[in-house]
Image: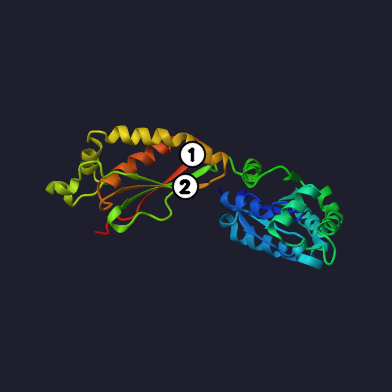
Amino acid sequence: MTPDMTPPQEVLIVTGMSGAGRSTVGNALEDLDWYVVDNLPPQMLRPLVDLAEKAGSTLPRIAAIVDVRGRNFFSELQEIIQGLRDSGGQLRVLFLEATDAALVRRFEQVRRPHPLQGNGTILDGIALERTRLSPIRESSDLIIDTSDLNIHQLATRIAESFAEQDTPGVQVTVMSFGFKYGAPADADMIADARFLPNPFWIPALRSSTGLDADVSEFVLAQTGAQEFIESYAHALEPVLAGYQRENKRHVTIAVGCTGGKHRSVAVATKLAELIAANPGVAVNLKHRDLGRE
């Protein structure tokens, strides 16, 4: 794309009622590769947009979470939003709503006061906040009522509304490793390839790795190897689909052998190829201990 065809900066302002789920929305947007700034004073919106425009494609989508924590600064938000809209660009405002009962319940669960309640009750703070936010709510592009949504359902709504078409539902890292160096602490699932014969004991294969054709062909030709990999990939299909529904966006599947050089590398490579065929899944292949010996 030539410079004069660069699309305008996409900016999302997230605001709404305290306790309505702004943190969940911020996390969901970060998972969708938005650049998220939390608790931004409205007066900093214009400098942020200017900075992002200079950054170009490195910061194509920005989300700013702005709310009453900005205190007196917040009163200027409506005017600043209008100014940004008048200057062009793709500006949207997301307003998060919830019933009084839902908000009271959430504040009581975390045992924190409402930011505007002062010496009054939680309901006093909610009522005051509704009054202050009314003009912004009226001019918002999207209003989401989170009263009956859990964090996973809210994250799903955000993904449906703000994900790019080519954004994967789940980013899967398939990692090979050697058990003698310790199992990866961040693995969600671990498969053991030590049931297969070890190429280490074959002199012609010892110095090669699972990335080399001779080792890979040897490992995958062993009894049970293809059956294991295909069955495991098939078993992961409903798991990955469930992760997408529950908005678990990053998953690590580890495959281990003794040293992380031969069997696990070959198996992980083939497994990654099969997992990549799942819709909505992007795969990253990593060999943690290759070259460590």
Looking at the picture, which amino acid does disc 2 mark?
Answer: Val
Q: Secondary structure at mark 2?
A: strand
**Residue 260 place in picture, x, y as percent:** 28, 52
**Residue 182 place in picture, x, y as percent:** 33, 57
Relative height, residue 49 to residue 94 (above, below): below
Question: At x 27% / y 36%, what residue is drawn?
Answer: 225
Name the disc covering residue 240, or none. Answer: 1
Asked whether, in this view, residue 37 is left or right of residue 190, the answer is right
Q: Is residue 290 visible?
A: no
- Name which quarter of the figure residue 193 lies in: top left
**Residue 16 place in picture, x, y as percent:** 76, 53
Question: At x 57% / y 42%, what residue is drawn?
Answer: 246
> Where is mark 2, residue-wise?
251
Looking at the picture, which amino acid does disc 1 mark?
Answer: Leu
- Name which quarter of the figure residue 172 lies in: top left
Asked whether, in this view, residue 202 is left or right of residue 116, the answer is left
Asked whether, in this view, residue 67 is left or right of residue 232, the answer is right
Crowd class of label 2 (few under 14; some 14 to 19; many from 20; radius 10 Å): some
